[in-house]
Amino acid sequence: MKVAIIGGSGKMGRWFARFLLQDGQEVVICGRNEKKLRAAGRELEVKVASMVDAIQVADAVLLSVSVESFEEVVAQISPHISPGQVVVDITSLKVFPVATMHKYLKGARMLGTHPLFGPGAANVANQNFVLTPTSDGERTLAQKVREYLEARGARISLMTPAEHDEKMAVVLGLAHFIAIISADTLINTDRLKQTEAVGGITYKVLLTLVESVVSENPELYASLQMTLPDMVGIEAVFHRKVTEWADLVKNKNRPEFIRRMNVLKDKLREDSPDFGQAYQNMYRLAAER
């Protein structure tokens, strides 16, 4: 199978190019930044082509572009997509990209997907993917994609685009928000360098989260914060809870602090079968840092 990767010089575009090449597929990459594209072509040892030429020779098209440019790119490629040609996107949002593909790519076999990992992953084994089919044809394609990825060790979930975005508001939106605020707090206390040398396991895990988020593309993270559903509401709850717990500390209300923490512990133990392994998992994560 020949796959055209639009946005092939980006981090995830290059990642999927490597994955497909190692799996024996043929890859051609295209994109807007000619210099970056040529460099990626040399690095990956793959063919570089114009967007139109890449699409015309491909069995499937993988869209690895930003949310901001997504509609422009899809509109641009729409006249060149053949009836029945497979088009898959890998954006972190799903409602808008899937609706956009439906709007412009009438004859394509399309599927919204979200690989829930970054370009640091070694391969797809034990990685989570979400597929968001919205019709019988898309469900048929999703089943084929599912079988392909599961055969290589990936974990697959199917849901609607709306369900995906609602879950991502917590999985990505809240997690990123906490990391960004933690980074801002650490920097503004002016103790980051002082504490790094004496940080324990919990601090190392926090710092890993902070650095992994802040080191990435700010445009992507801004898009997620401002596009995922109900982020304002979720972050308002977070703000309220920060205030409540800070007041317990300020007022030295030790009994209520302990009571609330025990309530949280009981709830998490009830909801998570692996709750008892969390402390060991934290040490394992810190050891990899």
Image: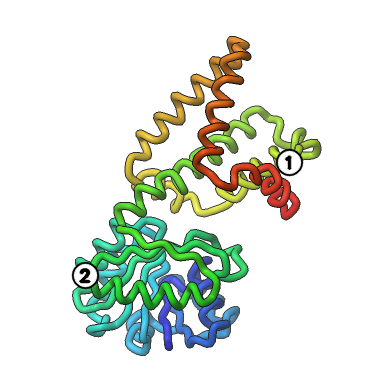
In this view, 74 is above or below 220 = below
Asked whether residue 284 appears in the rendered view, the answer is yes
In this view, 230 is above or below 168 = above
For this rendering, which residue is in front, 136 or 164?
A: 136
- Which numbered disc, 1 or 2, marks the residue that appears first in the sequence? 2
For this rendering, which residue is in front, 129 or 29?
A: 129
Q: Which residue is mark 2?
A: 104
Q: Secondary structure at mark 1?
A: helix
Q: CA distance from mark 1 to mark 2?
A: 50 Å
Amino acid carrying mark 1 in the image: Ile
Q: x, y percentage for residue 105?
A: 23, 73
Amino acid carrying mark 2 in the image: Tyr
Q: Residues within 10 Å of mark 2 (few under 14, many from 20)?
A: some
Q: x, y percentage for residue 227?
A: 34, 47
Residue appearing at x 36%, y 44% in the figure: 226
Asked whether residue 65 appears in the rendered view, the answer is no
Q: Nearer the viewer, mark 1 or mark 2?
A: 1
Q: x, y percentage for residue 213?
A: 56, 48
Tell me the number on the disc at residue 201.
1
Q: Quadrant of the N terminus?
A: bottom left
